[in-house]
Image (cartoon, helix red, strand yellow):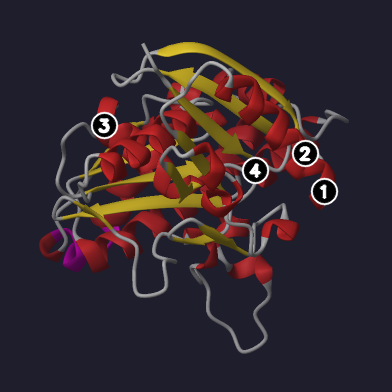
């Protein structure tokens, strides 16, 4: 039986998996992402050729950056991907090739098999080094006129004449930044140590909790802005830190606090459900495949 190859292009790792039509992972792996164009493309090619020998029936990619059809524009942590078109590169395989932005892949994964399954108006927010997003409105993935809908990191949360990156969602909603702040507060020299940060948070460390709650307040600002524009029923919170139950608990708590302070919002904007995303590190592999399946079947989401 033929299966599909899904490839998740990240700034740190290149993850890949062989999956069947139902989203079952047959096998998977990962390798470091080279930060030089030719080496990177050679690494991708090694993975593709390995599985092409197994007679795959489709190739699904997700990547950072703005993606127009199958062409990558910019590329986030991998700017050299600008202009790369994987459908063109692998046209000689004579199989369908689909490419999607990583934030959009996350919402497709949840809408297909996760905690947003079959919902018509929903979003996934991925909290990582920045803030990724994918939004579905009236049963359709929101792409926008320039294929850039869902670029939540660029949302300006505090407007100022001389504003810098400190005032945008990608910074204020950065999980990496929050973890670093907690580790500094507890005296941990390893500012990237997420386990230590959440150990302090979960144990009730006052400084750590204060930082987390301030962070969740900023995440609520992102959610409120989304809700005021597209009116969703459910928002799934993803990213590595979403595995910590306290995160979604505190985001919901902050949202309710905001509504209590702002009764006009409470009366006007229906509160969305805020849930943990089902998929963590493999979300983009599933979302990429679902995007490919939609194209193969001539469907649009």
Sequence-first tag of 4 and 1:
1
Of badges 4 and 1, the one in the foreground is 1
Q: Which residue is mark 2?
A: 42
Left or right, 238 with reference to 229: right
**What is the x, y in percent for residue 242?**
48, 30
Q: Residue at x 43, y 51 (%)?
A: 133
Please count the marks in the image: 4
Q: Which residues are magenta?
A: 261-266
Of badges 3 and 2, the one in the foreground is 2
Q: Which residue is mark 3?
A: 112
**Residue 35 visible from this viewpoint:** no
Secondary structure type for disc 3: helix
Query: Mark 1 near mark 2, Cβ–Cβ under 8 Å?
Result: yes
From mark 2 to mark 4, how far is it between C-alphas?
35 Å
Q: Which residue is mark 1?
A: 38
User: Within 10 angstroms of label 1, few (less than 14), some, or many (20 or more) residues?
Assistant: few
Q: Residue at x 48, y 35 (%)?
A: 59
**What is the x, y in percent for residue 36?**
84, 49
Q: Which residue is mark 4?
A: 178
Sequence-first tag of 4 and 3:
3
Left or right, 52 with reference to 10: left
**What is the x, y in percent for residue 106?**
41, 39
From mark 1 to mark 2, how far is it between C-alphas?
6 Å
Of badges 4 and 3, the one in the foreground is 3
From mark 3 to mark 1, how far is it between C-alphas?
34 Å
């Amino acid at each position: 039986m033929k299966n599909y190859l899904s490839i998740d292009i990240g700034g740190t790792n290149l993850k890949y998996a062989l999956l069947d039509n139902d989203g079952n992972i047959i096998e998977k792996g990962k390798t470091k992402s080279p930060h030089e164009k030719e080496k990177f493309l050679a690494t991708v090619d090694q993975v593709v050729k390995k599985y092409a020998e197994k007679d795959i029936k489709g190739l699904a990619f997700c990547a950072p950056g703005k993606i127009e059809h199958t062409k990558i524009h910019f590329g986030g942590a991998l700017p050299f991907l600008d202009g790369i078109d994987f459908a063109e590169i692998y046209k000689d395989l004579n199989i369908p090739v689909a490419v999607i932005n990583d934030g959009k892949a996350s919402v497709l994964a949840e809408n297909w098999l996760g905690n947003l399954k079959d919902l018509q108006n929903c979003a996934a927010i991925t909290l990582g080094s920045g803030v990724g997003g994918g939004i579905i409105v009236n049963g359709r993935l929101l792409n926008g006129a320039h294929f850039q809908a869902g670029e939540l990191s660029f949302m300006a949360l505090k407007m100022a004449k001389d504003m810098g990156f400190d005032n945008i969602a990608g910074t204020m909603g950065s999980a990496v930044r929050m973890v670093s702040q907690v580790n500094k507060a507890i005296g941990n020299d390893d500012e990237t140590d997420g386990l230590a940060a959440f150990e302090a948070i979960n144990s009730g460390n006052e400084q750590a909790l204060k930082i987390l709650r301030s962070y969740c307040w900023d995440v609520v600002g992102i959610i409120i802005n989304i809700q005021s524009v597209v009116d969703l029923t459910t928002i799934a919170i993803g990213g590595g830190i979403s595995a910590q139950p306290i995160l979604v608990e505190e985001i919901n708590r902050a949202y309710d606090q905001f509504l209590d302070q702002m009764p006009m919002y409470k009366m006007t904007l229906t509160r969305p459900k805020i849930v943990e995303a089902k998929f963590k590190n493999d979300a983009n592999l599933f979302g990429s495949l679902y995007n490919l399946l939609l194209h193969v079947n001539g469907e649009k989401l």
